[in-house]
Image: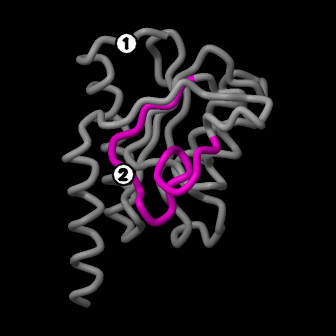
Amino acid sequence: MNYTVEEKEFFMREALKEAKIALDHDEIPIGCVIVKNGEIIGRGHNAREELQRAVMHAEIMAIEEANAYEKNWRLLDTTLFVTIEPCVMCSGAIGLARIPQVIYGAKNQKFGAAGSLYDILTDERLNHRVDLESGILEVECAQMMQDFFRKRRQK
């Protein structure tokens, strides 16, 4: 799955739209889309507060929607675009769903499991490894998170 820079930025902007939905619900603004054959088959945003479910991270919501779309738990030949580096839970779910490629915007120095704190997606001891890329629309993705937490601290 080779994407041009323009395509990567397009899909990351779609993930940013999902992050904005989370932000509008006073959730941590992380958004995600899953793409297959140039089409978005799953969308998600953080919704823990809204749904009162601890696992409702953007990636989990997008994986569940893509599973339903594909009628399959395996999401082969897909790419997951997410605004912020996946956490341990989401990285595990990405591996379990057999998603082969992840592209994320900004690193997550406190919870990141795709290069910052842990390297779950590329760990050779695990049975599934992911082609990983970061830095797509990094400034925009990081800025949304920084603004959210700055406002939260001011409250």
Report if residue 107 lies within the magenta region.
Answer: yes
Tell me the residue at 37%/71% (across/down).
26
Instruction: Determine which residue is flagged by label 2.
Output: 19
**In this rendering, would 9 be left or right of 65?**
left
Tell me the residue at 19%/46% (across/down).
139
**In this rendering, would 67 be left or right of 4?**
right
What range of the chain is rendered magenta? 101-120
Marker disc for residue 98 = none
The answer for how far apart the CA atoms under marks 2 and 1 are is 22 Å
Instruction: Determine which residue is flagged by label 1.
Output: 3
In this view, 115 is above or below 23? above
Kind of residue at disc 1? Tyr
User: Percent position (x, y) of residue 128?
Assistant: 73, 29
Mark 1: few/some/many CA within 10 Å (<14, 14-19, 20+): few
User: Percent position (x, y) of residue 59?
Assistant: 56, 45
> Quick check: can you spot residue 134?
yes
Numbered disc 1: secondary structure:
loop
Numbered disc 2: secondary structure:
helix
Front-most of 34 and 140? 140
In the figure, residue 146 lies in which quadrant? bottom left
Report if residue 12 lies within the magenta region.
Answer: no
